[in-house]
C-alpha cells in the first residue's frame, strides 16, 4: 500500500497500527469527490497492508461532516454527477464492510451523515466528549441513503433509529454511550491515547482469529447491506430531484427555516 500517493488522507504507523486521518479540516473533513475516491481506494487496499489494526480519525475539530453541502449543485438530482456521487458513496460503505482488518474510530466533534456511517461501521468507536453523531440528510430534504438506515437500527433499536433519522437529531454527551452509539466516551484530551490503546491490543491478538471473528460478527450487516443500502440510495437519488430538497439547500445556505410543500 503506497501511502505517499494520498492527498486528502494522512497515514502514520505506530508499530502494527496504521492511523488514517481524513485531512480536510477547513471543511470539517466533509467528503468531496477526491476524498471519496481516496476512501474507496484505502478501504480496498488496507487488508493488503502490513498493519494489523487501523485507527480512523479526522484532522482538526471534526471527524467528518458528511457530504460537502457547499458542493451540491443547484439542480440537485437532475445533475448526473449527483447520481455518480451516490453510487460512489455506496462503494465506500461496501468497501468498509468488506474490510477484514479491525478498525477503531476515534471521533472528535461532528460525525454527520456519511461521516456517522463511517464511524459507526468501524469495529470499536471511541468518542470524545465533544462528539456529536447523527444523520441529518432529512434536514436538507434527502433520504438517509448513505448507510444510516442500515447501522442506526442495529445500534439503538428500530424506533429510536427512526426518530433520530426522521428528525435529523444528533446524539451527544452521555447519550452516546447510554444508547450504545459508541463503545467508549472519554475526555477530549484522552481520545488519541484510548483509541491507540485499543488498536494496539487488537493488533497484539492472533490476526486470523481477530479477522475471522469480525467477519462472522458482520454477517448480519452484510446480509442486510444490499437491500437496505440499494433502496436507501435509490430513495436518496429520487429525493435529490424534489423541490423540497432544493428549498432545503437554499434555506441552509441562506441560514433560514425552510418552507416545504411535499413536492
Image (cartoon, rainbow, N blue to C red):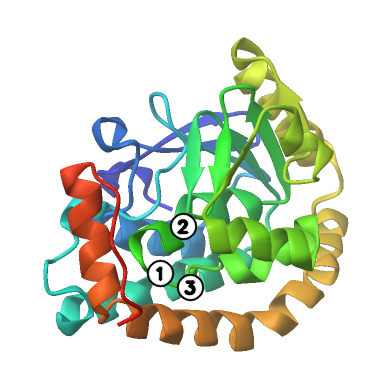
Which residue is under mark 3? 145
Q: Are marks 1 and 3 in contact (CB under 8 Å)?
A: yes
Residue located 55% across and 79% down the image: 229
- In what quadrant of the picture does the C terminus appear? bottom left
Is residue 234 in sight in this rendering?
yes
**In the visual, does 156 lie left or right of 148?**
right
Q: Secondary structure at mark 3?
A: loop
Name the image quarter holding residue 127.
Answer: top right
**Marker count (numbered):** 3
* Distance from Cα at disc 2 to Cα at disc 1: 8 Å
Q: Please identify, in this view, whether the residue under mark 1 or under mark 3 is nearer the observer.
A: 3
From the top left corner, tell me how far across and down residue 107 is, in percent. 57, 34
Which residue is under mark 2? 114
Mark 1 packing: few (<14 Cα in 10 Å), some, or many (20+)? many
Residue located 32% across and 52% down the image: 31
N-term mark: 3 or 2: 2
> Is 166 located above or below residue 61 in the figure?
below
Name the image quarter holding residue 218.
Answer: bottom right
From the top left corner, tell me how far across and down residue 3 is, in percent. 37, 44
N-term mark: 2 or 1: 1
Residue located 85% across and 70% down the image: 216
Q: Are marks 2 and 1 in contact (CB under 8 Å)?
A: yes
- Residue 89 - label: 1
* Distance from Cα at disc 1 to Cα at disc 3: 9 Å
Q: Secondary structure at mark 2?
A: helix
Amino acid at each position: 500500500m503506497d501511502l505517499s500517493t494520498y492527498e486528502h488522507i494522512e497515514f502514520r504507523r505506530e508499530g502494527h497500527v496504521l492511523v488514517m486521518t481524513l485531512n480536510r479540516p477547513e471543511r470539517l473533513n466533509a467528503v468531496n469527490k477526491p476524498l471519496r475516491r481516496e476512501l474507496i481506494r484505502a478501504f480496498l487496499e488496507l487488508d493488503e497492508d502490513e498493519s494489523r489494526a487501523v485507527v480512523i480519525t479526522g484532522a482538526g475539530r471534526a471527524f467528518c461532516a458528511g457530504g460537502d453541502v457547499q458542493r451540491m449543485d443547484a439542480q440537485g438530482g437532475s445533475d448526473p454527477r449527483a447520481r455518480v456521487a451516490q453510487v460512489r458513496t455506496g462503494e465506500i460503505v461496501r468497501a468498509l464492510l468488506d474490510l477484514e482488518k479491525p478498525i477503531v474510530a476515534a471521533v472528535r466533534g461532528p460525525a454527520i451523515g456519511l461521516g456517522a456511517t463511517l464511524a459507526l461501521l468501524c469495529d470499536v468507536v471511541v468518542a470524545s466528549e465533544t462528539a456529536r453523531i447523527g444523520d441529518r440528510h432529512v434536514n436538507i430534504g434527502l433520504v438517509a441513503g448513505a448507510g444510516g438506515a442500515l447501522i442506526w437500527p442495529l445500534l439503538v433499536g428500530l424506533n429510536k433509529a427512526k426518530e433520530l433519522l426522521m428528525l435529523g437529531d444528533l446524539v451527544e454527551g452521555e447519550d452516546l454511550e447510554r444508547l450504545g452509539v459508541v463503545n467508549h466516551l472519554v475526555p477530549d484530551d484522552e481520545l488519541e491515547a484510548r483509541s491507540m490503546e485499543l488498536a494496539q491490543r487488537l493488533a497484539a491478538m492472533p490476526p486470523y482469529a481477530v479477522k475471522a471473528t469480525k467477519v462472522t460478527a458482520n454477517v448480519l450487516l452484510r446480509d442486510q447491506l444490499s437491500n437496505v443500502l440499494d433502496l436507501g440510495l435509490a430513495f436518496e437519488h429520487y429525493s435529490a430531484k424534489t423541490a423540497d430538497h432544493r428549498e432545503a439547500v437554499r434555506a441552509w445556505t441562506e441560514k433560514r427555516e425552510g418552507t416545504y410543500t411535499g413536492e
